[in-house]
């Protein structure tokens, strides 16, 4: 192990790479996955469940390609459209269960959006593993190099 670290890349590079990965993992978890998960949980507890209809789907290519789904629903005689990242399972005309905030009907979430929870949990696990690697690197690399 000492030869791999000392021959190809230095300990500072290893620490930097692990630190960048940890910061990226925490960023995705805290800034993206957690707010989506929190919104889903909040609306499932406080919102009302209604059915919407898929009115439009289109593929977006941004690095990877993914589907954007438009679901139209009605509350108190007003029509609203909710856009979300979807997949091939949704087709135009399909009925979709939503949680909607009755005080702010534009605030909606899919009832069956379990992926937000999985992304959040996966982000926590990845961040924890990277933190362990960082602690290991900080404590072990100096002794490997004879510092």
Image: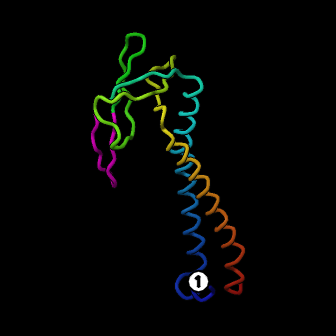
- Residue sitting nearer the eye, 15 or 111: 111
Among the 4 quarters of the image, the one containing residue 93: top left
Identify which residue is drawn at 53% across, 48% down.
Answer: 119
Identify which residue is drawn at 49% across, 26% down.
Answer: 99
- Please name the colour scheme applied to the rendered image: rainbow
Give the tally of numbered discs.
1
Q: Is residue 142 above or below residue 76?
A: below
Q: Is residue 82 left or right of residue 55?
A: right
The image position of residue 145, as x and y in percent, is 67, 85
Q: Within 10 angstroms of label 1, few (less than 14), some, or many (20 or more) residues?
A: some
Please name the predominant secondary structure of the magenta segment in the image. strand
- Residue sitting nearer the eye, 8 or 129: 129
- Residue sitting nearer the eye, 43 or 127: 43
Identify which residue is drawn at 69% across, 71% down.
Answer: 136
The image position of residue 13, as x and y in percent, is 55, 75
The image position of residue 7, as x and y in percent, is 55, 88
Specify whether residue 39 is painted magenta.
no
| Quadrant position of the C terminus in the picture | bottom right
Please give the range of residues in magenta: 55-69
The residue singled out by tag 1 in the image is 5
Q: Is residue 138 left or right of residue 25?
A: right
Q: Is residue 117 above or below residue 10?
A: above
Among the 4 quarters of the image, the one containing residue 80: top left
The image position of residue 73, as x and y in percent, is 38, 21
**In the current view of this chain or complex, which residue is farthest to the top?**
77
Mark 1 element type: helix
| Quadrant position of the N terminus in the picture | bottom right
Q: Is residue 17 left or right of residue 70?
A: right
Q: Is residue 128 above or below residue 5?
A: above
């Amino acid at each position: 192990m000492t030869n791999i670290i000392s021959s190809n890349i230095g300990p500072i590079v290893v620490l930097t790479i692990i630190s960048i990965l940890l910061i990226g993992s925490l960023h995705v978890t805290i800034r993206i996955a957690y707010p989506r998960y929190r919104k889903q949980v909040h609306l499932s507890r406080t919102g009302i469940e209604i059915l919407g209809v898929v009115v439009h789907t289109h593929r977006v290519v941004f690095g990877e390609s993914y589907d954007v789904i438009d679901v139209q629903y009605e509350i108190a005689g007003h029509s609203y459209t909710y856009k979300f990242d979807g997949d091939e399972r949704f087709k135009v005309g399909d009925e979709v269960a939503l949680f909607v905030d009755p005080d702010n009907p534009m605030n909606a979430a899919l009832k069956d959006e379990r992926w937000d929870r999985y992304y959040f949990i996966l982000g926590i696990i990845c961040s924890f593993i990277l933190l362990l690697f960082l602690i290991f690197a900080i404590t072990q690399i100096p002794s490997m190099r004879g510092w």
